[in-house]
Image (spheres, rainbow, N blue to C red):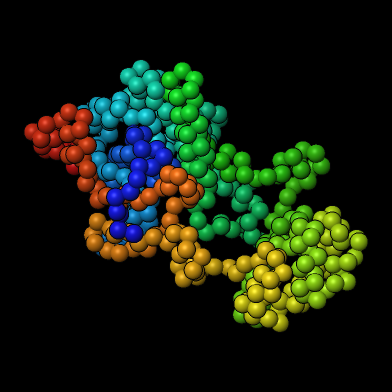
Amino acid sequence: MNLPDLQPGALAGLKVVEMGQLIAGPFAGKTLGEFGAEVIKIEAPGAGDPLRNWRLLQDGTSVWWQVQSRNKRSVALDLRQAEGQAIAKKLIDQADVLIENFRPGTMEGWGMDYDALARRNPGLVMLRISGYGQSGPYRDLPGFGAIGEAMGGLRHLTGEPGRVPVRCGISIGDTLAALHGTIGVLTALYHRKVNGGKGQVIDVALTEAVFNVMESLVPEYSALGAVREPAGSALPGIAPSNAYRCTDGVVLIAGNGDSIFKRLMQAIGRDDLGADPALADNAGRVARVGELDTAIEAWTVRRPVTEVLEVLGNARVPAGRVYTAKDIVEDPHYRARDMILQQVTRDGHQLEVPGIVPKLMGTPGSVRSSAPRLGDDTDAVLQEIGFAAGDIKALREKKVVA
């Protein structure tokens, strides 16, 4: 995808100032930008967002950065200086949305608490993402996504029984917080439009964003005193649903629907189990989950993954191979759904990157611009809010901007 002229997105005309860094705040900004919002990213002169240097680099820049910051404009601005804070306030004056994911109190220290900003811009919607939220006894503690995953209840369930919990391999706590924050922003914008025109603060805690997706974890404890424990690749209380060995890999099979279970048993030659009235519902299957997993793996372990998937696909049983990055990029379904896009970096590299989710049929998201170099848009953005070229030069000499 070479950034052609595209129709305006669903959020065209929405102005966003992003002051966050790393993952949670910027992922929310990325999502809004993909659907047409103008996102101005404020970064510290010199190093910029640390994500620019995270994980694997190409020509000195993280390839992760190329995804996280597409459709954004970079303004290098020193918020530790009063003049830098004044410029930020002018940008926020014209914004619909402000995103920040600093430790609580940081914005207040810069004179940018919500009340002060809202006096200048009453319609401002401010998304604040932090480890524990803007209130409560843990408010001032530092928090990263990994800690949110731990204290939100997720990390205890990941891994094999009796072993040290493991992370899922990505910063899922940050992304969950970003998605909750995006929902909050869109909800607040709708409220602003139809119910009086005022903005508000969206307070998202990493721990709470994780906790919100923990399904029946607390109700089970409340009602029955049950503390859910790690279960490896199985889905506790739902059967059969697990990972099963094949001759050349592993497949995940979800045969836990009543009718699906019968089709699964027929496909693996165990009609006896499929016809057993004691296994007709989930409760009965959970009571004999070990027996069922053994029967399924006795069938899969003698067959390659491709054969298992073909047989189960024909039987309309949900099953899938465990994909690597290579598998995803080579998969024709991902390609057909535009989930692998071609993006050209500012350094001229062709890069394959993830597509856009969700897919809006009328106003689809798009990649309108590649991720900026640090300060690429400083001059243009400052000129748009009234600064002359000489003013910008003077600010640069004082290292307020870069």
At 48% across and 59% down in the image, what residue appears?
337
At 21% across and 46% down in the image, what residue appears?
376
Q: Position of residue 266 (x, y in %)?
A: 80, 72
- Name the residue at the right extreme: 277
Q: Position of residue 125 (x, y in %)?
A: 42, 28
Task: State whether residue 246 appears in this view.
Answer: yes
Q: Position of residue 95 (x, y in %)?
A: 33, 30
Is 330 drawn above or below residue 212 in the view shown?
below
At 38% across and 20% down in the image, what residue appears?
122
Quadrant (top left/top right/bottom left/bottom right) for the N terminus: bottom left
- Name the residue at the left extreme: 390
| Image position of 354 (left or right of 245) | left
User: In the image shown, does 394 or 106 lie closer to the viewer?
Assistant: 394
Q: Quadrant of residue 397?
A: top left
| Image position of 376 (left or right of 279) | left
Is 116 drawn above or below residue 8 in the view shown?
above
**Total marks drawn?**
0
User: In the image shown, does 38 or 332 lie closer to the viewer?
Assistant: 332
Q: Quadrant of residue 113?
A: top left
Task: State whether residue 140 appears in this view.
Answer: no
At 19% across and 42% down in the image, what residue appears?
402
| Image position of 262 (left or right of 176) | right
User: In the image shown, does 189 or 402 lie closer to the viewer?
Assistant: 189
Q: Position of residue 250 (x, y in %)?
A: 63, 72
